[in-house]
Amino acid sequence: MTDILVLGGAHIDRRGRIAGVTAPGASNPGTWKEEAGGGAFNCARSLARLGHAVTMVSPRGGDAEGEAVAIAAAAAGVVDRPFTFLDRRTPSYTAIMERDGNLVIALADMDLYRMFSPRRLAVRQVRDLMDKTDFLLVDANLPPETLAAICKAAEARKIRLGGIGISPAKVVRYKELLPFFSWLFMNEAEARALTGAAPNSHREWPGIMRNAGLSGGSITRGGGELIAWDQSGTAFLTPPPVEEIGDVTGAGDGFAAGFLHARLDGGTLGDAVMHGAASARLALASEMATAEELTRELLMGTLPLVPAGEIVL
């Protein structure tokens, strides 16, 4: 079991799903769903369900949505330590998806995350949490100056650091910080935004990222071959198709959780990509952003459905 401190987004996800063929500019019949979410929070909940000791620190409003996030944290076994602003609204992400689960458009109301300034890291509670943790995980919802301060704090304490890309617009906040990270989890659009690169083959990404200063990470490509690398080598794996997709939201966060679970438990890079793909598969099959039934046993039972990756040393 690893002691993990997560600093980043924990908010409300609102997702509408169109029932038929999407008609732009018109009213579309469909269904509406609301739950707690956020890149860092999704990953935190999955890691807690997999048996790790996870603490989450994030800004929160003094409203019903903030209470819903707290309830979701408790249900997953995450220790919740928010900065609560009673006069502010909890951040939210609102998405409209097509019938097959693919995103049409989304709106992110994330202004409160600006309140997680570098001086918040000097609060005794946060200092104490950092002093005792084995691994730090952040997401790009936090302001650039706060991410920089977290990187320096992790380096001073010799704590391994992981990051989640969140979106092409936000992942660029990591651009000057890449050497601090052990692993950074992205999709291909985020990788392009971060580097400005457009490789002829996706297999060129590890070299591009290493040249940019990132020693470890992963790039997921929907149902296409994913790439992961760190100081031990490079891995390629094509995820098996999911018969029925419940929701694409959170699949990348699920991959990050499965990958970190295996790597922090001492697994190889090959183990990590297989665990990541298995965890993402469970997230995709769920109608929620995370697989609420996730356990170590369920993850192990899903591994036989995932092919072994190609490892290049």
Image: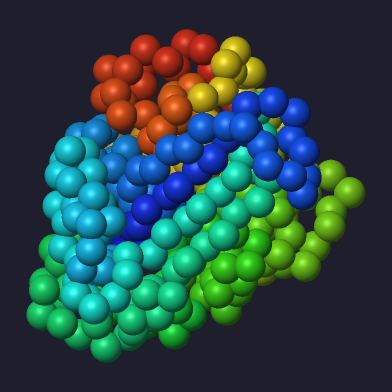
Q: Which residue lies at the image location 16% right of the left edge and 63% below the top edge?
A: 81
Left or right of residue 85, residue 178 in this image? right
Left or right of residue 280, residue 5 in this image? left
Q: Nearer the viewer, residue 5 or 181?
A: 5
Applied colour scheme: rainbow
Eyeballing the image, is 292 above or below 211? Answer: above
- Which quadrant does the N terminus fall into? top left
Eyeballing the image, is 65 above or below 23? Answer: below
Eyeballing the image, is 258 above or below 170? Answer: above
Left or right of residue 155, residue 39 in this image? right
**Residue 186 pos. (x, y %):** 58, 52
Residue 135 in which image quadrant? bottom left
- Give the residue at the far bottom of this rendering: 119
**Residue 83 pos. (x, y %):** 20, 72
Eyeballing the image, is 5 above or below 34? Answer: below
- Which quadrant does the C terminus fall into? top right
**Residue 215 pos. (x, y %):** 55, 59
**Is residue 25 something one can see in this rendering?**
yes
Q: Which residue lies at the image location 23% right of the left edge and 50% below the top edge?
A: 68
**Is residue 227 something one can see in this rendering?**
no
Q: Which residue lies at the image location 63% right of the left edge and 27% below the top edge?
A: 19
